[in-house]
């Protein structure tokens, strides 16, 4: 049997345990944490030989996801926008329904966007086995062959003989304590639950309907009553929001009689914490992982990660130091899982550092807030070639733009102005304006804002090529 294979990439996570690098508005799957690609690009490349992928992500990251996908996908992916997060079962359900609109019962290869797999050959071999079992009507989970007792993962219990085609799943187990995890690894019958699955679209929906009948019904309604927004499939929020917030493990895999486990030994990591980044990275003779401008003196087994400035560390052992544009993390490696507690506190205190970096990406480019005071803010703005900001105005601030490099067309009221390097223009409070880069090179400029309120929500948009309200 030759089946159509459709990759389904889930890109909705926030990666809070990798704060301050990973944040809600710019999560870990969109970052380059290893190799020469982002984690999303690595994932899409891993299954690039199959049909156009379906990517499920949230609205805020849609343009970054689309741009990164365009760099590695041979055919344009279908990108589904979740209006609210409802975990993996509803996300996979809408992807399965969308796949059935274009193919006759395809095999879905469901992959989180934020995993690392170093051994592509072993992955391809296991995937071929999983596809074969899916064609026979099974719902296949990849079980990672454990190399140590791990308390941060759930486990799959399956009595798999060496070099076999896998086995039926006896049980899914929650994250264990250390002694229990040691017993699991010693037994040889337990595997880490990778969160990667393979099944036919129709088998998945039929099985899900037995145990969570509302989910496929609501997902179908949300898809059919949704809308096409540019190149994105926007689900109907009122229907999708009624779905139960539940993972595929709880909704289906723990209940179905068709659950099957294929072992995977491919140097896998979910890179879910800074400790796992340290474990999976190349180290110096002292066991240190150094990224960026770092001087490590008499340090051992530490992670020193710098994005902008020099980190000088002396006498560190088993310590993590992660320095970003506006936040610094210092912790012991054994406390890597507690980084999420810091993020929770930042959210509770309504601090922007839980969500935003200093540099913020937009579909037209990016801006970097380099200085801010009570009544002023200075930004470094980059506009992509051919891109244009929305036609807009502000109620509470005026702006002064100075071109650093490139060429700008500025619409100010009813007039257009062409600016080149070292030229500037003033936009009074309340004036309609738009910024466009007509050239083939990046436009860089400095924006000086002044006024009584400088928040990003002081924008009234009149026209926008990206369809933003």
Image: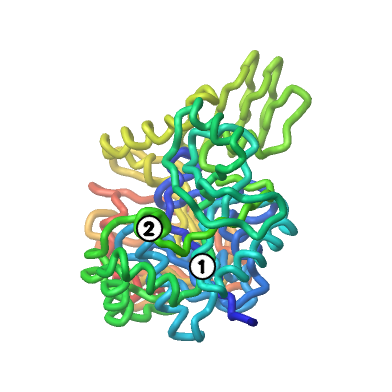
Q: Residue visible at 47% across and 79% down?
A: 99
The image's mark for residue 189 is: none
Q: Is residue 43 left or right of residue 92?
A: right
Task: Give the answer, above or below, for where 370 lies relative to 382.
Answer: above
Disc 1 is placed on an element classified as: loop
Mark 1 near mark 2, Cβ–Cβ under 8 Å? no
- State the residue in front, 264 or 12: 264
Residue, disc 2: 255
Q: Quadrant of residue 296?
A: top right
Disc 2 is placed on an element classified as: loop
- State the residue in front, 263 or 19: 263
Q: Residue visible at 58% across and 48% down?
A: 159
Q: Give the mark nearer the N terminus: 1 vs 2.
A: 1
- State the residue in front, 116 or 381: 116
Q: What is the distance, in whole Å, between disc 1 and disc 2 at their CAs?
A: 13 Å
Q: Residues within 10 Å of mark 2 (few under 14, many from 20)?
A: some
**x, y (%) of residue 138?**
51, 67
- Which part of the image, by quadrant, shows the N terminus? bottom right
- Residue 440 visible in the shown view: yes
**x, y (%) of residue 394?**
27, 61
Q: Residues within 10 Å of mark 1 (few under 14, many from 20)?
A: many
- Which part of the image, by quadrant, shows the C terminus? bottom left
Q: Residue visible at 76% across and 29% down?
A: 284
Residue, disc 1: 138
Q: Quadrant of residue 275?
A: top right
- Residue 465 visible in the shown view: no
**Can you name the residue that lies furthest to the right here?**
285
Q: Is residue 448 left or right of residue 242?
A: right
């Amino acid at each position: 049997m030759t089946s159509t294979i459709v990759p389904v990439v889930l890109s909705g996570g926030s990666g809070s345990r990798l704060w301050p690098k990973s944040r809600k508005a710019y999560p870990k799957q969109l970052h380059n944490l290893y190799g020469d690609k982002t984690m999303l690009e690595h994932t899409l490349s891993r299954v690039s030989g199959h049909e156009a992928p379906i990517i499920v992500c949230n609205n805020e990251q849609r343009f970054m996801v689309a741009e990164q996908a365009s760099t590695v996908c041979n055919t344009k992916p279908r990108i589904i926008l979740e209006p609210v997060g409802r975990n993996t079962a509803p996300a996979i359900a809408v992807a399965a329904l969308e796949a059935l609109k274009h193919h006759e019962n395809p095999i879905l290869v469901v992959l989180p966007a934020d995993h690392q797999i170093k051994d592509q050959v072993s992955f391809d071999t296991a995937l071929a086995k999983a596809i074969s079992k899916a064609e026979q009507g099974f719902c296949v989970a990849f079980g990672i062959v454990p190399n140590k007792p791990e308390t941060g993962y759930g486990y799959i219990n399956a009595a798999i003989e060496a070099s076999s085609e896998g086995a039926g799943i006896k049980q899914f187990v929650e994250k264990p304590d250390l002694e229990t995890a040691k017993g699991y690894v010693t037994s040889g019958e337990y595997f880490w639950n990778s969160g990667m699955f393979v099944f036919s679209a129709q088998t998945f929906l039929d099985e899900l309907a037995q145990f969570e009948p509302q989910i496929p019904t609501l997902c179908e309604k949300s898809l059919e009553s949704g809308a096409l927004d540019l190149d994105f499939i926007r689900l109907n929020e009122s229907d999708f929001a009624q779905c139960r917030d539940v993972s595929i493990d709880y909704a289906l895999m723990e209940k179905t009689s068709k659950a099957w486990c294929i072992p995977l030994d491919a140097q896998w990591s979910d890179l879910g914490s800074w400790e796992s980044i340290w474990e999976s990275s190349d180290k110096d003779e002292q066991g240190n992982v150094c990224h960026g401008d770092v001087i490590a003196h008499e340090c051992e087994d530490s992670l020193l990660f710098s994005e902008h400035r020099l980190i000088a560390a002396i006498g560190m052992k088993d310590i993590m130091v992660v320095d970003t544009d506006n936040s610094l993390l210092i912790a012991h490696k054994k406390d890597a899982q507690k980084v999420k507690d810091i993020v929770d506190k930042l959210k509770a205190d309504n601090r922007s550092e839980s969500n935003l970096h200093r540099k913020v990406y937009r579909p037209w480019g990016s801006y970097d807030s380099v200085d801010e005071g009570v009544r002023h803010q200075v930004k470094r703005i980059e506009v992509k070639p051919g891109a244009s900001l929305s036609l807009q105005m502000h109620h509470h601030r005026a702006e002064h733009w100075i071109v650093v490099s490139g060429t700008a067309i500025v619409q100010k009221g009813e007039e257009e102005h062409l600016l080149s390097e070292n030229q500037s223009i003033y936009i009074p409070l309340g004036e309609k304006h738009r910024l466009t880069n007509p050239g083939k090179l990046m436009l860089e400029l400095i924006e000086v804002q002044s006024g009584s309120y400088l928040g990003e929500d002081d924008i009234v948009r009149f026209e926008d090529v990206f369809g933003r309200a």
